[in-house]
Amino acid sequence: MKKWFAVIGDPIEHSKSPAMHNAWFEEMSIDATYIPIHVSSEQLESAVAGLKTLGASGWNVTIPHKTAIIPYLDELDELAQKMGAVNTVVRTTNGKLKGFNTDGVGFVRSLEEAVGSSHKDKPVLLVGAGGAARGIAFAMQQQGYNDLTITNRTVANAQAIVDEMGIGRAISLKEAEETLAEFSIIVQMTSAGLATGNFSMPFSLNRLEKGAIVADIVYNPLMTPFLQAAEEKGATIVTGLGMFVHQGAISFEHWLGNYPNTNSMIAQLKAQLGGN
Ligand code: NAP
């Protein structure tokens, strides 16, 4: 029987996940389909029951349901439990719904694909303390990055993640700007300016070291002002597209057991987003 998968969120119409997963199904001759479903917060509980009854094999969860869905699931993977957020639901062979979070691991995979995995002992500055930042902080800790500093507009939110991780420290954006030269890897994870399309910088990169690695998890636009400024300073830059494709590929692997071709997907999406 044809398998089917979905992504639920609000809004959902701009999601690139359906096109990505359907392209992988076609490329790998898998008899399956993946659909976007608009689900409001009020509809979440009944939507999960509906997906279960109607036989979805699994689905992705996006804003604003990543935390709210947890009470409706039967089990959580260890990392999703720590993060308190789920972006992937798998229907297990015994019919249970198990939640995973592939965002953070997707980011680490994308980072290491771009710059290798020899930077684990270097000082990392994580900029932002929202849902995505939380996932990335826990995944970096799990993958062996042990010198983590989190900076955020609201320092208390950064401090809360540090307290839960049991390592690292939280600093203000001003302190981050002033001490920027101390960091080898900087990851921009805020949504500053996203709502208006008028992206702003969380702080200036004037003090950035030339050899630094700078990643942004925003991928539309591909070249954010943060990455542009970093490139002008001679840094190695990593766009957010790799994270998006790898988080989807890890979900795909949870559902179907195979890792799809991420290189050709990154190239296709890059062309669509105006990159070269
Ligand atoms: P979120 O939970 O709403 O968190 C937003 C973060 O941005 C918070 O740290 C917030 O600081 C900060 N912020 C917002 N406006 C700011 C401003 N004007 N100046 C400074 N800081 C500001 O959002 P999220 O889910 O973590 O997502 C963050 C970004 O990641 C979004 O742009 C999203 O598109 C992107 N993302 C990309 C991927 C991918 O696959 N590449 C995956 C997930 C998310 P406060 O705590 O002070 O409010």
Image (cartoon, rainbow, N blue to C red):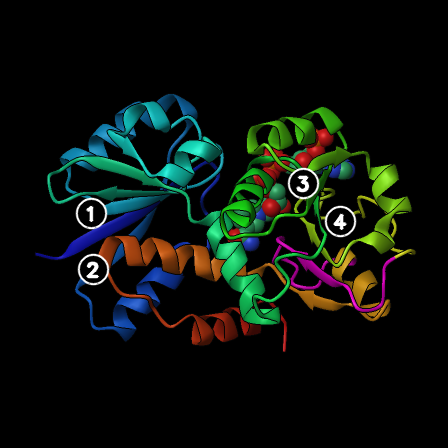
Query: What crowding class fits label 2: few (fewer than 14 Cα within 10 Å), some (14-19), or many (20 or more)?
Result: some
State the image coordinates of residue 252 (x, y, percent, origin top left): 31, 57
The residue labelled by disc 4 is 199
How far across and down, in percent of the image, does residue 154 sit?
Answer: 74, 28
User: Residue visible at 87% across and 46% down?
Assistant: 177
The quadrant holding residue 43 is top left
Magenta span contains residue 218: yes
Which is closer to the viewer, label 3 or label 1?
1
Asked whether, in this view, residue 15 is left or right of residue 126, the answer is left
Compared across the picture, whether 75 is left or right of 95 comes to right
Q: Give me the C-alpha separation between circle 2 and circle 3.
A: 34 Å
The amino acid type, in three-letter code, at marker 3 is Ala
Note whether residue 14 is visible: no
Label 4 close to label 2 by CB (< 8 Å): no
Q: Residues within 10 Å of mark 1 (few under 14, many from 20)?
A: many
- Answer left or right for 86 relative to 194: left
**Quadrant in the rendering for residue 186:** bottom right
Residue 84, can we see it?
Answer: yes
Does the stretch in magenta take in 168? no
Q: Earlier in the sequence, mark 1 or mark 4?
A: 1
Query: Distance of mark 2 from mark 1, alpha carbons?
Result: 10 Å
Residue 147 in the image: x percent, y percent?
Answer: 67, 47
Badge 2 element = strand
Query: Which label's residue is closer to the chain start, 4 or 2?
Result: 2
Q: Which residue is mark 3?
A: 195
Task: Specify the quadrant that holds the C terminus.
Answer: bottom right
Cα–Cα gap, marks 4 and 2:
37 Å
Crowd around label 3: few <14 · some 14–19 · many ≥20 (10 Å): few
Q: In this figure, which residue is indicated by the disc labeled 1?
A: 57
Q: Quadrant of the N terminus?
A: bottom left
Type of amino acid under label 1? Ser
